Image (tube, rainbow, N blue to C red):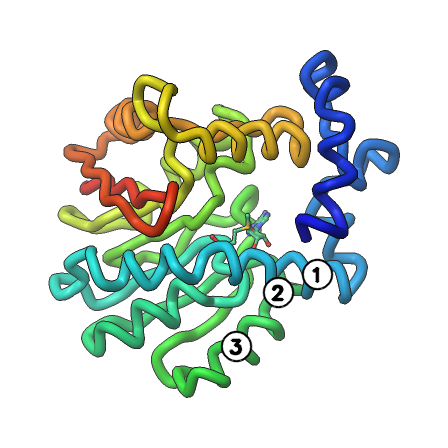
C-alpha cells in the first residue's frame, strides 16, 4: 500500500496542507474512499492485507496486556480481516468475538479466521457505522477507526460504543496515539498527516483528547496502554 498508493499521494502534501482536501484516488473522483477502494477486489485485498500487516503486532500486544478475563463478548467495529478478534480469541478462551465491517470485507475476514481455526469463536458480520447502532457487547474495540474521521463523526462513533456497552464495559481504541504535548510521537504526527492525504478532514489525536471526548459522552475512567512501536490502546470504561 505504501509503495503502490501512498508514496505518490504524499507528493501533493503541500496541496493538502493548503486546501485541506484529500490527495488520493478520490482527489478527482470525489467518491467516498472506501467505496472507491472496495469497487476493485485487488485494491480491497491490498488495503485489508496492509491493515493486517500494520496492526497484527499491536493486537498481539493488546491481547497480552489488557485484562480480558472479566469479559465474555467483544465486538470489533471496522475489524477488516478480523485480526484483533483472532488474537484476542487465541489468548483468551473465555471470550467470543465478532468482527464487523462493510459487506465486501466479510469474505476476506472469513478466510483469515478459518485459516486460524477460530470460526467457532470468531464471527463476522456487516455494519455501516454511519447508519447502524452497534450490537451489545462487554468490550467494543476500534483499531484505527476514529482517526479516519472528523470530530463530529468521532463523537458519533464514541456515542454508539457507549450505547452498546453495559456498566463496567470497556471501549478500546488502538491508534498511533500522539503524546499529550505533541512533541515526541513523530510517527503519530506523520500518521495524522497521512489521514489528511487520505480523508482531508481526518486527524490523529492524543490520549488527553480521547479522555475528554469519552468523558463528554459519559465514560467514567480512561487508561492508556503502550503497544508495539508508536502505537497505544486507549481504554474508556463505562
Ligand atoms: C483503517 S482501517 C482499520 C482496520 C482495522 N481495524 C485495523 O486496525 O487494522 C478502517 C476500517 O474501517 C472500515 N470501514 C470504513 N467505513 C466503514 C463503515 N461505514 N462502516 C463499517 N466499517 C467501515 C474499513 O472497511 C476498514 O476495515
The residue to which callout 2 is attached is 105
**Horizontal placement of 84 versus 208: left or right?**
right
Q: How many discs appear?
A: 3
- Examine the rendered structure and indicate whether residue 167 appears above or below residue 72: above
Classed neighbour count for the residue bearing mark 1: other residues with Cα under 10 Å, few (<14), some (14–19), many (≥20): some
* x then y, percent, for residue 53: 52, 61
Residue beneath the point at 74% across and 49% down? 35
- Inspect this view and state whether residue 182 appears: yes
The residue to which callout 3 is attached is 112
Per the image, label 3 sits on a secondary structure element best described as: helix
Classed neighbour count for the residue bearing mark 2: other residues with Cα under 10 Å, few (<14), some (14–19), many (≥20): many
The residue to which callout 1 is attached is 44
**Horizontal placement of 50 versus 29: left or right?**
left
- Examine the rendered structure and indicate whether residue 204 appears above or below residue 2: above
* x then y, percent, for residue 134: 41, 52
Give yes or no for contact between labels 2 and 1 (Cβ–Cβ under 8 Å): yes
What is the distance, in whole Å, between disc 3 and disc 2 at their CAs? 11 Å
**Quadrant showing the C terminus:** top left
- Examine the rendered structure and indicate whether residue 44 appears above or below residue 16: below
What is the distance, in whole Å, between disc 2 and disc 1 at their CAs? 8 Å
Residue beneath the point at 72% across and 29% down? 22
Per the image, label 1 sits on a secondary structure element best described as: helix
Amino acid at each position: 500500500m505504501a509503495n503502490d498508493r501512498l508514496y505518490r499521494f504524499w507528493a501533493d502534501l503541500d496541496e493538502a496542507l493548503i486546501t485541506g482536501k484529500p490527495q488520493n484516488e478520490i482527489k478527482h473522483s470525489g467518491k467516498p474512499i472506501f467505496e472507491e477502494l472496495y469497487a476493485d477486489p485487488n485494491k480491497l485485498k491490498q488495503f485489508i492485507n496492509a491493515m493486517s500487516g500494520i496492526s497484527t503486532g499491536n493486537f498481539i500486544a493488546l491481547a497480552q496486556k489488557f485484562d480480558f478475563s472479566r469479559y465474555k463478548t467483544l465486538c470489533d467495529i471496522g475489524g477488516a480481516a478480523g485480526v484483533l478478534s483472532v488474537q484476542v480469541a487465541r489468548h483468551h478462551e473465555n471470550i467470543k468475538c465478532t468482527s464487523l465491517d462493510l459487506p465486501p470485507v466479510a469474505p476476506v475476514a472469513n478466510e483469515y479466521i478459518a485459516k486460524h481455526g477460530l470460526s467457532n469463536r470468531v464471527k463476522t458480520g456487516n455494519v455501516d457505522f454511519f447508519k447502524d447502532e452497534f450490537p451489545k457487547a462487554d468490550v467494543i474495540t476500534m483499531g484505527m477507526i476514529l482517526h479516519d474521521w472528523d470530530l463530529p463523526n468521532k463523537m458519533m462513533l464514541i456515542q454508539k460504543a457507549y450505547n452498546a456497552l453495559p456498566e463496567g464495559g470497556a471501549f478500546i481504541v488502538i491508534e498511533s496515539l500522539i503524546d499529550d504535548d505533541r512533541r515526541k510521537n513523530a510517527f503519530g504526527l506523520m500518521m495524522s498527516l497521512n489521514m489528511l492525504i487520505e480523508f482531508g478532514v481526518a486527524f490523529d489525536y492524543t490520549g488527553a483528547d480521547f479522555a475528554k471526548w469519552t468523558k463528554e459522552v459519559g465514560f467514567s475512567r480512561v487508561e492508556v496502554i503502550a503497544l508495539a512501536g508508536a502505537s497505544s490502546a486507549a481504554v474508556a470504561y463505562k
